[in-house]
Amino acid sequence: MSAGQAFMQSEQQRAQQQAQANAANSQAQAAANNAIAMQQQADMELQKGEVEKRRIDMERDKVSRSYQAQAAANRSLLASGNVDLTSGSAADSLLGNAMLFGEDMAANRYNFALADWQANENARQARWQGDVYNAQSQGYAQQASWLSKSAGGIGNSLLSAGIAGVSSFAGGALMGGLGGLGSSAGSSLMKTTEITPYLTQYGRGNGSLVR
């Protein structure tokens, strides 16, 4: 392989590897952003749960005040008519109201527990999804790092091979003598040996062909 071919091949492969590394870096950043978004979603779910539980508690207090006011009014009405509140229809009426209140309170407490569970479950799922995105981000970052290092290795290895080919050609020409090669061969030798410093400089990672 000639030095020029080695340079072109290494440059193409290096560019392809670097493009893949850049894509992996972009995917890593996107996954990291998604992980942050899911953590924010988890926090928001907990906040929504707290708001809902406060609403249900306010509803409980409202039901309790309503029952107490209604029970007091019923007792006052029955007492004003000299009705025995401990037996008969009057007691049944008061007991029925108390049972309805108990059912309302039970439903309220169930709704409270359900809201609490739902908020924590939503937050747990959001955090789990965030962990998945974090793992993906780390995987993409490692892939990008490997591709970037590999891209540099491709350039150095292929350029070294091209330079070795030039050196081998030059050594063989010198061993055989320039006179036997003719003027065109001597000219070719000079051209190939002249580009060696350029390739050596590039192989050191400069990235540009400069003297």
Image (spheres, rainbow, N blue to C red):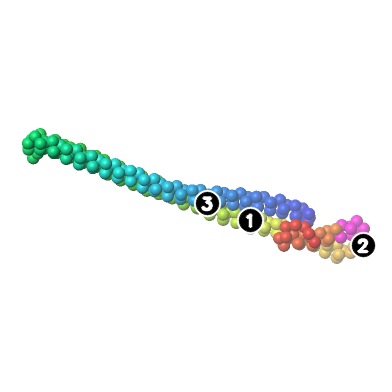
Task: Assign the magenta stretch its main secondary structure.
Answer: helix
Indicate the position of residue 18 as horizontal and vertical percent values. Answer: 65, 52
In the drawing, what numbered circle is on residue 179?
A: 2
Query: In the displayed image of the protein, which residue is found farthest to the bottom?
Result: 175
Q: Earlier in the sequence, mark 3 or mark 2?
A: 3
- Between 128 and 15, which is closer to the camera in this rendering? 128
Q: Is residue 116 visible?
A: yes
Do labels 3 and 2 touch, CB within 8 Å? no
Residue at 92% x, 58% y is 182
Amino acid on which the number 1 mark rests in the picture:
Ser
**Which of the two marks, 2 or 1, is nearer to us in this view?**
1
Residue 100 relative to residue 122: left or right: left
Amino acid type for the residue under numbered disc 3: Ala
Separation of marks 3 and 1 at Cα, in angstroms: 20 Å
Label 2 is placed on what type of residue?
Gly
- Residue depicted at 56% across the width and 56% down the height: 142
Marks counted in the figure total 3
State the separation of the CA atoms marked 3 and 2. Answer: 66 Å
Task: Please give left or right for residue 63 compared with residue 4 in the image.
Answer: left
Estimate the x, y position of residue 80 in percent, counting from the top left. 10, 36
Q: Name the mark on residue 206.
A: none
Residue annotated with mark 1: 148
Magenta residues span 182-190
